[in-house]
Image: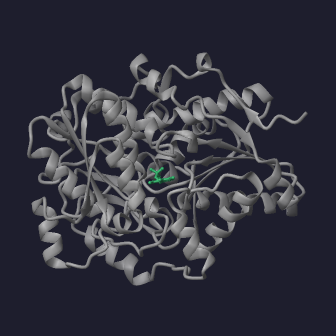
Amino acid sequence: MEVKKILLTEDEMPRQWYNIAADMPTAMQPPLHPGTGQPVGPDDLAPIFPMNLIEQEVSTERWIDIPDEVLGVLKIWRPAPLVRAYNLEKALDTPAKIYYKNESYSPAGSHKPNTAVPQAYYNKVFGTKHITTETGAGQWGSALSFAGAQYGIDIVVYMVKISYQQKPYRRLMMNTWGAQCYASPSTRTEAGRKMLEKDPDTPGSLGMAISEAVEAAVSREDTKYALGSVLNHVMTHQTIIGLEALKQFEKVGDYPDIVIGCAGGGSNFAGLSFPFARDKIHGKEMRIIAVEPTSCPTMTRGPFAYDFGDTVQMTPLLPMHTLGHDFVPAPIHAGGLRYHGMAPQVSQLIEDKIIEPLAVHQIETFEAGVLFARTEGIIPAPETDHAIAAVIREAKRAKEEGKEKTILFNMSGHGLVDLAAYDAYFSGKLSDYALPEEEIERALKTIESLPKINAG
Ligand SMILES: Cc1ncc(COP(=O)(O)O)c(C=O)c1O
């Protein structure tokens, strides 16, 4: 009988995360202080993050132990199965073997709890009482709310206004786990009030919500801030996905030729792909593809440059692909992919040609998600649909070339709380949107006066 799910026992769960900083082909550029433009040290980050997470952020140790208290909570849904998508293969009549890592099993329904749990844990150990954060689609906010409840930490979430309006159930999930959630920009912070003054009808953006959450964190001693993507320690926590997948492939004697993930800030993509990227850096032939929307083409069209992570320029300057810190993306339905920047590690690996970026149109992504739902059963999140669209392109290419490729992708989340997006697709209300060239030129202008990346 064909094996559908390749499973690991709890005993086989990885006991360490993989930190790709130890294997980067090009050394990372340091984050810079927003005021002085000088490299930031751990002390500069101390008002925002607990020191134990700052140590991980700057660590170059290849392996970092996963505390037992974290493993205990991750076991609620991990290890996650590696699944062979036989029905999708059949529907596409492709010689390609398609596998996916199913991250939709977690309590919040996505990969986000893989880092929410350790971040809440390290804050607890440090003595933090409250954590503030932002959320786009609501996945990260709900993941952190779940994790906060596990360790008894109070969570306050600033949710991008358009998503807050489109996704009331995400807010209710956060409330059920005991967190407070506010539409951003809000009147609760100085940054929010300024943004509302400028444009009272703004749909909000992740950049704006980050400004609010950071301001709320630095204004109290017992409060820290948590970020669900972009930063090095978040990428590291997510590598449990790829480390499990490596063990699962070993069990069936296979290995992927192509690894695919969607990328908003880069974390689910990095989590799946970095353990494989390690092999590629050391000479293995394979392709690693990061997929983004054409409406927010950070990796494919944004320059690699220093930029702020937020709109009001409070965060350190990060070396990354960016569309400019004041970029307000079109209100497409994949809310988690509407961020102006990209993880510095993912950005650097694009420069180093380890990772290939790809942009796809919105309608193609929903076509892909619907085909996946009708063949494999699970209704994917609109973000995940981007990865599936790329998988389908590669499976079709394998058919044209008559090659039996092994494709692995990250099923980063289910779309059960995103059905309004599918409704918009079915009723023909969605359109494709490519960012006009003027927007890219505008992005270049907003970063013109910032420090430049040292190419040498
Ligand atoms: C299901 C899902 N996939 C992907 C993403 C994109 O985020 P990241 O690039 O950090 O994985 C999100 C973000 O909210 C998400 O909810």
Q: Is residue 394 toward the left or the right of residue 145 in the image?
A: right
Q: Residue at x 18, y 63 (%)?
A: 312
Q: Quadrant of residue 9?
A: top right
Up/down of 130 relative to 65, above or below: below
Task: Name the residue: 19% across, 31% down.
Answer: 128
Q: Nearer the viewer, residue 249 or 126?
A: 126
The quadrant where residue 185 appears: bottom left
Answer whether residue 230 is visible to the viewer in this image: no
Q: Position of residue 3 (x, y in %)?
A: 82, 34
Residue 57 picture location, percent across and down: 32, 35
Residue 237 appears in view: yes
- In the figure, is residue 255 to the left or right of 111? right
Image coordinates of residue 377 in percent, x first then y, are 71, 52
Which one is in front, 106 or 344?
106
| Identity of the residue drawn at 51% across and 61% down | 418
Residue 358: x and y in percent read 58, 63
Residue 151 versus residue 389 in the image, above or below: above
Where the N terminus falls, by quadrant?
top right
Which residue occupies 26% across, 71% down? Answer: 446
